[in-house]
Image (cartoon, coloured by chain):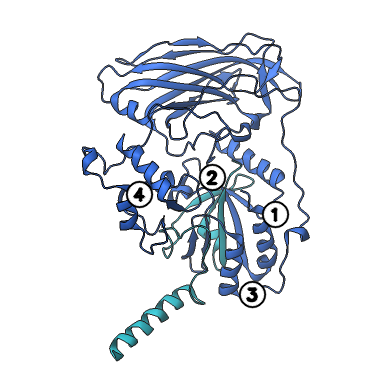
Chain colours: A blue, B cyan
Amino acid sequence: MRNVPSLETVYQDYKNKDVAFFYVYKALAHPGKSGLVQPLTLDERLAHVAKAKTQLGTKIPWLADSMTNDLKHALGERNNSEMIISPDGKIVIARSWSDPAVLRTDLAGLVGKSANTTTIADLDVKTESTRRPEKVATGVVKLIPRKQEAAVLSVKPIEVKSGEEPQPLYVKLRAEVDSASLRSGKGELYLGFFIDPIHRVHWNNLAPTLTFEIKTPDGVTLSKTAGEAPKPEDVDADADPREFLVDYDFGGSDSPGPLEVTVKYFACDDDDKWCSAATQKFTVAWTVNRDAGKVSKERPSGGGGSGGMRTSGQKGKGKGQMMSSADMMKRLDANADGKIVESEARGPVQRNFARFDANEDGAVDAAELKAGMEQMRR
Amino acid sequence: MIKRLTLMTITFAIAASAFGQGPRAKGKGGPLSIEGQELPELTAFDESGKEVALKQVLKGRYGVIVFGCLT
């Protein structure tokens, strides 16, 4: 949210003109960026909100989307969209990417121009660094290259008791496959165990290293059902993910059951008040989680291999029957400005607009359209 | 010709009144398909974790909603 300071200036000028402002904290767009991982509970999402307030120094109040991401789904599925709602509950403006300068103009047209024009320099913004403690190393474990278009599987935690209380979800599991292999039922499964900085914890490398075990459903075979993470050398504490690749085969099943993954590890809190062993369990279903976010661009990207997405319009359609991206651009680019905005998109481009719009600028240009169509053909 | 001009004028007037003060300003992001629709009944949570109905917190005044996250 790079435009927060500018939005805050609009808020300062229009909050007294009876305009209500809210940020809506949604599912992470790029989990892994700055070490952050997708929250699994409302309390964790609210902790993200608190972190956003201090990190960004916001005065505009926040709302948290529900854990089923209802607002995101109902209001356009975009990462940084903005909308203006009229007093009678109509969405009068809905922009795919927030633009504070244009928002200011829109509000002036709707409620009258503000007497003030606050600048960013006028704001007394107090931001707070959220860097990890120096003792917690990062970048010490070699990451497995991942691709931004990987299909992220649906992962759910299974409650594990720690004494009387449920074990906190210090570790989050991210499971990815490529879409083509998911369709064929045979491929490579990525399992990444991320220690969640929102809990202010890190791996304890003085204790035994992380291990996992996987229970497979009938028919599904894995190249390994247990593993142990290598221990980073000369580092007592770190926060890098522990990652594994496992080959999978559905054994011809069309609807394979979920995996059950158990992970055991040792963690310490960042304030050095405790270190302890922990066990967590997850189910991994072979269905794509559309709210999981794209792999962070901070990660090394995978070269080669396949990826791409499934679209309902593509099923059973041969390569030769698909039009070229240039023809598609001509067909959809109604105002001939060389890009397709969401209101111009139709068919698979409309249904998968967020995926086509790789740079998230609210429009699909020729290169993005070509890349998106190539993914669909795989 | 007169008929066509009248139709164009009416169309423009309807479009302008729908917005309130004339055509929407152009922005970096294109318009979303939900523009012009009724805000659905949606539930979110305030900073303290209290469940709130989005329509209720905006009711009776203009509201600005901006989506975002820390990544």
**Chain ID for label 1?**
A
Nearest to viewer (mark 1 / mark 3): 3
Determine whether the residue tagged by mark 4 lies in a helix, strand or loop: helix
Please, which residue is most extreme toward the top here? A208
The amino acid beneath tag 4 is Val
Same chain shared by disc 4 and disc 1? yes
**Chain ID for label 2?**
A
The mark that comes first in sequence, 4 or 1, is 1
Q: Determine the CA span between mark 3 and mark 4.
A: 38 Å
Of A85 and B6, which appears nearest the observer?
B6
Local crowd at mark 2 within 10 Å, few (<14), some, or many (≥20)?
Answer: many
Q: Which mark is residue B13?
A: none
Residue matched to label 2: A26
**Chain ID for label 4?**
A
Q: Determine the CA span between mark 3 and mark 2.
A: 30 Å
The mark that comes first in sequence, 3 or 2, is 2
The amino acid beneath tag 1 is Lys
Residue matched to label 3: A113
The mark that comes first in sequence, 4 or 2, is 2
Of A142 and A29, which appears nearest the observer?
A142
Measured as percent of width and height from the top left, residue A281 is found at: 50, 20
Measured as percent of width and height from the top left, residue A286 is found at: 36, 27
Label 3 close to label 4 by CB (< 8 Å): no
Residue matched to label 1: A59
Same chain shared by disc 2 and disc 1? yes
At a point 32% along the width and 54% down the height, the residue shown is: A346
Nearest to viewer (mark 3 / mark 4): 4
